[in-house]
Image (cartoon, helix red, strand yellow):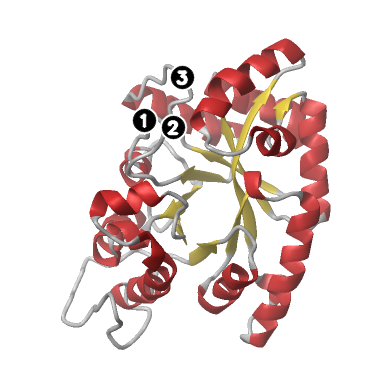
Amino acid sequence: MEFGAHLPLMDFGGHPFTLDHLLRYARTAEQLGFDMLCANDHLVFAVPWLDGPTALAAVVESSGQMTLATTVALVAVRGPVPVAKGLAAIDRLSGGRLLVVAGPGSSAADYRSVGVEFGERWARLDEAVRALRALWGKDPEPFTGRFYSTAGIDLRPRPAQAGGPPIWIGSWGSEAGLRRVARLGDGWLASAYNTTPALFAEALTCLNGYLSEHGKNPEKFPNALATMWFYITENRSEAEHIFRHRVVPAVKAPENLLQERLPIGSAGAFAELLAQFKAAGLQHVLVWPVADEARQLELFFEKVASAV
C-alpha cells in the first residue's frame, strides 16, 4: 500500500491559508516519504476552501518527486478547455508528474455558481474526459459532443507526458459509476467516508468484471481511496473535541457515518482500518489531517503507515 497526502485546502477552524503553510506541508510530506500530493476541488463549500489547481501549482517546486494529483478535478464545472490548459501547465512544470482524477463532484452549489445544471453532471463528465484526451493529443481526432467540442482548438504547449497525464475516474462505487470508471478511466478513485473495507471489496469485484468487458486487465488497473480525514490521538476527549468542533461543522454528512468511517482517534484503530482496506485490494490511500497538519503527517508515518 502506498500513501498520499491531501493538501490542506479546507478550513476546519482557523486555517492560515498562506503560501508558507502550504509549502511547509508539502516539504514535510516529501521528507516523510509520501508518494503522492493531492488537491481536491471546490469553488464554493460550507467552509472556506483554497483553490485546488492553484495550490497544486504553488507546491511543484517543494514536492520533490511525488506524484501530483487532482482528487478530483471538477471538469464539468470548470469546463474541459480551462482544465486542460491549466493542468497541462502543471504537468510541464512538474516534469510530467501529474495524475488527473476527474469526477462530477458532490456539490450542487459548485454547479449553480457557474450556471451549469447539476442534473447534467454525469453526461458532461463523460464528454469532458473525452475532450481532455483530444485536447492533449491522445485521440487523433477532435471531440464533438452535445456539450463540448475541441474542433479547431490548439492548446500548446501540451503536457510533458505524451498524450497527456493518465485520467482516473472518481466514483463512490455505484454500478453506473463503476461502469464509467471501466469505460473511461485509467484508474479508480473511491471516497473514504462513503465506503468501508467490505463495500470497497464488493465494488472492486464488480469493477474487475466491467474492466474485462472493456478489454482492460484488472490486475494492472490502479485504485486509491481519497478524502480520508484523520486525527491521531490516544486521548478520547481530544478525539471527541476534534470530531465535534472541526469535522462535523465542515463535512456535511451524517454524524454516525463520519464517526464510523473516519479515523479520528487512536493510531492502532487507524492502522487496523487500513489493514482491512489493504486486504480488500486497496492500493493507495490519500490522507488528510484535520488539525496540526504537519505533526499529524509525522504521527501517521511513525505510528500507522509502519504498522500496515
Q: Mark 1 or mark 2, which is nearer the start of the sequence?
A: 2
In the rendered structure, find residue 124 and report the number of the disc placed on it. none
Kind of residue at disc 1: Pro
Q: Residue at x 18, y 74 (%)?
A: 154
Q: Position of residue 207 (x, y in %)?
A: 69, 72
The residue identified by callout 2 is: 10
Question: Any mark on residue 48, and which?
Answer: 1
Give the SS element for disc 2: loop
Q: Which quadrant is the C terminus positioned in?
A: top right
Between 136 and 226, the residue placed more toward the observer is 226
Q: Secondary structure at mark 3?
A: loop
Marks 2 and 1: CB-CB under 8 Å? Answer: yes
In the image, residue 137 sits, relative to residue 95, either above or below, namely: below
Q: Quadrant of residue 121?
A: bottom left
Classify residue 32 as left or right of residue 72: right
Say if residue 98 shows up in the picture.
Answer: no
- The image quarter containing residue 49 is top left
Residue 135 in the image: state x and y as whole percent: 29, 74
Q: Is 52 or 122 nearer to us in this picture?
A: 122
Q: Residue at x 56, y 18 (%)?
A: 245
